[in-house]
Structures are given as structure tokens and as C-alpha cells.
Image (cartoon, rainbow, N blue to C red):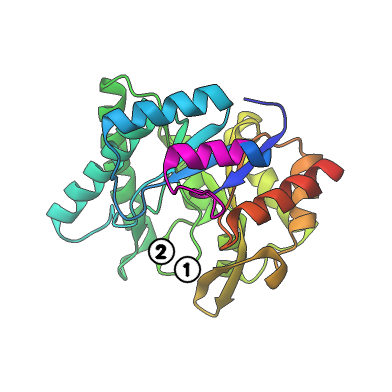
């Protein structure tokens, strides 16, 4: 892992002439960014052959890759077939990600469905343990990262994803600062960002800050939390304060930008960070 933070887009940059993953990685490299998240949010539609090809481009350019699993995952679904399908989607994402040399897969873990959060936690934990056990049996070392979620109906508070990361080997958090701001209406100042990083270190030790996967974007939110992503300059997210906190705590890892203008905001974040 490179010292400091690497920045890049969630998905193929919009300015890529041919919208393929390989061309997207080349474009990320041309732009001078350092990483890219491969988006499988509508399903894992990449063959093993293509994954190897993607990996070759990633290797040649030095661009670090991660993957986002399909949205259709709910490890707390009431119907067993939906839980089985959810675990299958995670395993498939992790398999393809490992073939292209990706380090982590990110996913939205579950909905509470009006059940007690403690009960949902145990259900999610049990299902995730089964996923990680299968991956390690296949010698797949990809990190599985539940995302910090932006709505109160979604499982994935800061405490929940950190607790999973402590209790299950092979699980680590994806910290989405915009989601947490949307969900709480807070956590949008330097001191509050430092507080989040402090909580991560308290639970996971220094290694929790040494290998982070971070999502950042502008966000539109209301009383129920996240509505949609915005470009940073159209939002109230105090990204300069966030970058200062990350720099002051010497956070390391990947910062994936999910703004609608993804590569422009990734460049804005990188330039701002490098100027600090």
C-alpha cells in the first residue's frame, strides 16, 4: 500500500472514450489518480477471462482496484432463498475481484425490516462468517467490507460495522463519511471526523487507519437520511475538514469518490489533500 491516500472514482470515469473497465483504468492512470472501484452494483457481469484482462491493466498501470458488490443483498432477508442469493452474490463478487487483483469488496449488508438491531446484528454476523469461511477455503484473501450506510432503515451504523470487523477475521469497514453525515445530520466538522477516526483506532488498532477504504461524495439528505449523491461543491460536506483530519491522523488506503462527476471530484480531493 502506498504511503498516504490514493484517490479515484467509483466506476469507469465519464471521460473514458470506450466505456470498458480496462479503458477506465487506463483513463484513471492518464488523469494521475491512483485507484478505481469496479462497479458490480447491477450484477457481476464480468467473465473470468475479462477479469484477468482487467488485472493485467491494473498491474501495468499500478492502479489499485476494489469492487462494489450488487445492491441486491440483504443478509437479514426473511426469505431464506434471498439470504442464499445474497451470500452467492458476495462470493461471486469476491471471486472476480480476486482474479483482477482487487484488495476489497464493498457491499450494503442488510435492512432492519423492523426487527431489533441486536437480533439483526447476530443474523448478519452469522451469514458473514459463512461467507468468509467459504472464501478462505477457496484461498481467496479479498477483504469483505460492509459499508457505513446512509439511512436509518439500513443496517450499517459505525458501531455495527466496526463490531463486525473486530469479531470476524477477514471483515473490515468501508467508511462512507457522506452516508454517516446524512444518517446523523452531524459528523461534518474536523473534530467530528477526528472522533470517527479515533473510534476506528480504538476498535481496530492502528491497522484500522493504515488500510482504510473510504467513500466520499456530496450528499442530499433529509430526516430519513440519504436521498442522492451530489457533486462536492453542490453539497454541505466539509471535505477540506475531512481531508485535514485524515492527513493529521496519517490515514492510509483508498478514497473512492461517488459524486456524479466522479473523476472531477476525485481529482479535487486529491489536489486538495496534496496541498495540505
User: At which x and y percent is residue 261?
Assistant: 60, 60
Q: Is residue 230 magenta?
A: no
In what quadrant of the picture does the C terminus appear? top right
For the N terminus, the quadrant is top right
Residue 18 is one of the magenta-drawn residues: yes
Q: What residue did someone put label 1 on?
A: 151
Q: Nearer the viewer, residue 145 or 196?
A: 145
Q: Is residue 209 above or below residue 267?
A: above
Question: Distance of mark 2 from mark 1, alpha carbons?
Answer: 6 Å
Residue 236 place in picture, x, y as percent: 71, 71
- Mark number displayed over residue 39: none
Q: Which residues are magenta?
A: 10-29
In this view, the residue farthest toward the bottom is: 223
**Residue 82: which quarter of the image?**
bottom left
Which residue was labeled with disc 2?
A: 154
Mark 2 in CB contact with mark 1 (< 8 angstroms): yes
Q: Residue at x 46, y 35 (%)?
A: 104
Q: Is residue 203 visible?
A: no
Amino acid at each position: 500500500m502506498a504511503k498516504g491516500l490514493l484517490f479515484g472514482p467509483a466506476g469507469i470515469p465519464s471521460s473514458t472514450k470506450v466505456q470498458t473497465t480496462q479503458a477506465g483504468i487506463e483513463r484513471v492512470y492518464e488523469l494521475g489518480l491512483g485507484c478505481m472501484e469496479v462497479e458490480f452494483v447491477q450484477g457481476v457481469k464480468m467473465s473470468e477471462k475479462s477479469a484477468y484482462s482487467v488485472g493485467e491493466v491494473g498491474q501495468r498501470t499500478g492502479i489499485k482496484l476494489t469492487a462494489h458488490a450488487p445492491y441486491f443483498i440483504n443478509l437479514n432477508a426473511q426469505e431464506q432463498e434471498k439470504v442464499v442469493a445474497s451470500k452467492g452474490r458476495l462470493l461471486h463478487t469476491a471471486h472476480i475481484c480476486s482474479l483482477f487483483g482487487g484488495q476489497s469488496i464493498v457491499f450494503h449488508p442488510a435492512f432492519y425490516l423492523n426487527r431489533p438491531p441486536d437480533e439483526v446484528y447476530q443474523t448478519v454476523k452469522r451469514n458473514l462468517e459463512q461467507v468468509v469461511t467459504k472464501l478462505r477455503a477457496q484461498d481467496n484473501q479479498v477483504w469483505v467490507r460492509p459499508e457505513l450506510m446512509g439511512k436509518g432503515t439500513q443496517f450499517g451504523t459505525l458501531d455495527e460495522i466496526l463490531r463486525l470487523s473486530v469479531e470476524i477475521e477477514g471483515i473490515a469497514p468501508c467508511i462512507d463519511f457522506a452516508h454517516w453525515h446524512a444518517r446523523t445530520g452531524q459528523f461534518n466538522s474536523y473534530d467530528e471526523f477526528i472522533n470517527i477516526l479515533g473510534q476506528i483506532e480504538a476498535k481496530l488498532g492502528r491497522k484500522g487507519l493504515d488500510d482504510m477504504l473510504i467513500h466520499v461524495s456530496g450528499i442530499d439528505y433529509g430526516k430519513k437520511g440519504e436521498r442522492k449523491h451530489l457533486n462536492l461543491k453542490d453539497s454541505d460536506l466539509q471535505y477540506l475538514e475531512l481531508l485535514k483530519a485524515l492527513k493529521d491522523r496519517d490515514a492510509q488506503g483508498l478514497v473512492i469518490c461517488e459524486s456524479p462527476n466522479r473523476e472531477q471530484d476525485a481529482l479535487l480531493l486529491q489536489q486538495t489533500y496534496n496541498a495540505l
